[in-house]
Image (cartoon, rainbow, N blue to C red):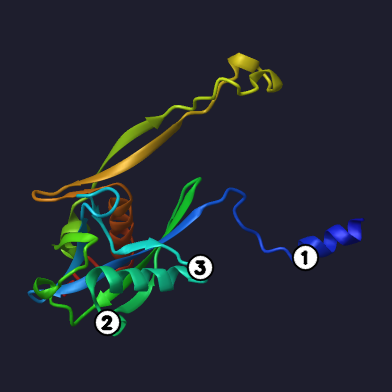
């Protein structure tokens, strides 16, 4: 039996035990007035979370890699040719109990933001200079999620029963206080992490143009 178990484990590819939905986004860099900007979308009322700020992206389709999904979604939402997008690399990603979000940094050197005509999922686009995020930190606010059980949850089968001390989840959620747009949650998290990576690897005197 141990030999059989050994063979099973030798050929097993580890994955998350929980069934997680997989999403991919692109953090697009564009040139505006000879300066590098980050491009954001405002979600339309045809999709979930209308009015929210996001990066181009969405769920993986069958057989897709995260990178392929990020490129496909960007093509579809911004109505671009894939040749207009140069993927500079993959950055740190977000893992939650029920989903994974991977983020790729893309350079769109020939894209004129004013001439973009996004699809029906996008109400509009806007850009913020990269230098803004290299000098301004987001403010983090705490949100608490309380663990609650269904009425038929078998508390009698666990140590402590009704007195068991469930661990509540506290999340730190970032907000950038922009004058004309909302920027918070996952999109702000990814933006902040990207700015940290750039600051960690460059000199303060570098020009971001």
Where's residue 166, x and y in %? 54, 25
Q: Secondary structure at mark 2?
A: loop
Report whether 165 appears left or right of 199: right
> In the rendered image of this protein, does residue 165 appear above or below residue 143?
above
Q: Specify the farthest residue to the right.
A: 1
Determine the image quadrant of residue 70.
bottom left
Q: Specify the farthest residue to the bottom.
A: 83
Where's residue 107, x and y in %? 27, 76
Marks 2 and 3: CB-CB under 8 Å?
A: no
**Count of labels in the image:** 3
Give the residue number, with chain letter if any, for mark 1.
10
Report whether 4 appears left or right of 21: right
Badge 3: residue crowd in 10 Å (few <14, some 14–19, many ≥20) = few
Report whether 143 appears left or right of 155: left
Q: Secondary structure at mark 3?
A: loop
> In the rendered image of this protein, does residue 103 appear above or below residue 209?
above
Marks 1 and 2: CB-CB under 8 Å?
A: no
Badge 1: residue crowd in 10 Å (few <14, some 14–19, many ≥20) = few
At horizontal 52% and vertical 28% (from top left) the residue drawn is: 167
Where's residue 43, x and y in %? 22, 55
Q: Secondary structure at mark 1?
A: helix
The label nearer to you, 1 versus 2, is: 2
Q: Determine which of the numbered discs, if any, sits on residue 27 in the image.
A: none
Give the residue number, with chain letter if any, for mark 3.
62
The label nearer to you, 2 versus 3, is: 3
Q: Determine which of the numbered discs, if any, sits on residue 81 in the image.
A: 2
At horizontal 75% and vertical 67% (from top left) the residue drawn is: 11
Q: Quadrant of the C terminus?
A: bottom left
């Amino acid at each position: 039996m141990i030999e059989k178990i050994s063979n099973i484990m030798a050929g097993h590819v580890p994955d998350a035990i929980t069934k997680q939905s997989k999403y991919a986004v692109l953090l697009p860099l564009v040139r505006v007035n000879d300066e590098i900007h980050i491009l954001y979308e405002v979600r339309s009322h045809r999709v979930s979370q209308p009015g929210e700020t996001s990066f181009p992206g969405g769920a993986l389709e069958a057989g897709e890699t995260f990178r392929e999904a990020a490129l496909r979604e960007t093509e579809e939402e911004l109505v671009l040719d894939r040749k207009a997008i140069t993927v500079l690399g993959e950055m740190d990603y977000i893992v939650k109990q029920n989903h994974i979000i991977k983020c790729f940094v893309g350079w769109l050197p020939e894209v004129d933001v004013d001439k973009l005509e996004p699809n029906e999922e996008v109400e509009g686009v806007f850009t913020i200079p990269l230098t803004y995020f290299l000098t301004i930190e987001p403010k983090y606010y705490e949100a608490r999620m309380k663990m609650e059980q269904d009425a038929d949850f078998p508390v009698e089968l666990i140590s402590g029963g009704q007195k068991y001390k469930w661990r509540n989840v506290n999340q730190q959620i970032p907000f950038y206080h922009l004058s004309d747009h909302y920027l918070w949650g996952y999109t702000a998290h990814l933006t902040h992490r990207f700015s940290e990576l750039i600051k960690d690897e460059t000199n303060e005197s570098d020009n971001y143009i």
